[in-house]
Image (cartoon, rainbow, N blue to C red):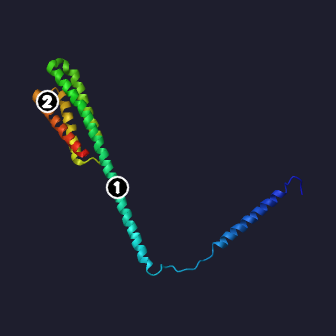
Amino acid sequence: MRIGGRRAAPLRLSALAIGSAAALAMIVVGCTNVTSGEPSAPQGEAPLYRASVSASLQESAASSSARESERQTSMTTQAVHTSCEAMSTSSADAIGAVNTYVDAFNSDPAGAAGKGQAAVDALNQSADLVSGSFTDTLPPELRDALNGWVDAARGVATAIAGNYGAEEFNAAIAALNDSKTTALDRCDAAYR
């Protein structure tokens, strides 16, 4: 035997290994016991259990359906608000730019070119913003009305950029005003 316990370490390792093996053998032996009992439900309780499970599944399905319906309604509401806000704010800016162009054209046709480009840009920005706000949850009739605005805004932008005559320009402005009224009316109805 050496001083300092250097030989005692192998003995400890051997004892640890033997103890671990014994513990493992006890676990294996303990897990092999078979319990007794009947593999069937007591008479009369099985129908009650089945009815309970069926009721639970029906309740769960109804609850899940209600949550999905609420989620869809919330998504539709958000889509309406997003698209209608885009229409409301950007159309006001676009109409303002068009009116500024018309005033400039009526007072100084030669100097109205800069105002015309600003109107074209505002109309196209509004059309892009509105059409970019669409989602699949937007109601179809509202989407159609907003698309009417998008088309009319692009039509007026084309008329200004193409320097169309008064008759064609006024027809494009009439379509723009009609589409704006229709779209905003549909937005108001969707908010209710």
Q: Earlier in the sequence, mark 1 or mark 2?
A: 1
Q: Which mark is residue 117?
A: none
Mark 2 = which residue?
A: 169
Callout 2 amino acid = Phe
Q: Is residue 47 left or right of residue 179?
A: right
Nearer to me, 89 or 124:
89
Q: Position of residue 57 (x, y in %)?
A: 39, 66
**Which element is circle 2 on?**
helix
Q: Is residue 116 left or right of residue 137?
A: left
Callout 1 touching callout 2 (CB < 8 Å): no
Q: Residue furthest front?
A: 192
**Which element is circle 1 on?**
helix
> Which of the 4 quarters of the picture holds residue 188?
top left
Tag 1: Cα neighbours inside 10 Å, few (<14), some, or many (≥20)? Answer: few
- For the image, the number of numbered tags is 2
Nearer to me, 120 or 87:
87
| Residue shown at the point (17%, 30%) measured from the top left | 159
Can you say whether 172 is above or below 18 in the image? above
> Which of the 4 quarters of the picture holds residue 50?
bottom left
Q: Is residue 134 visible?
A: no
Tag 2: Cα neighbours inside 10 Å, few (<14), some, or many (≥20)? Answer: some
Mark 1 = which residue?
A: 68
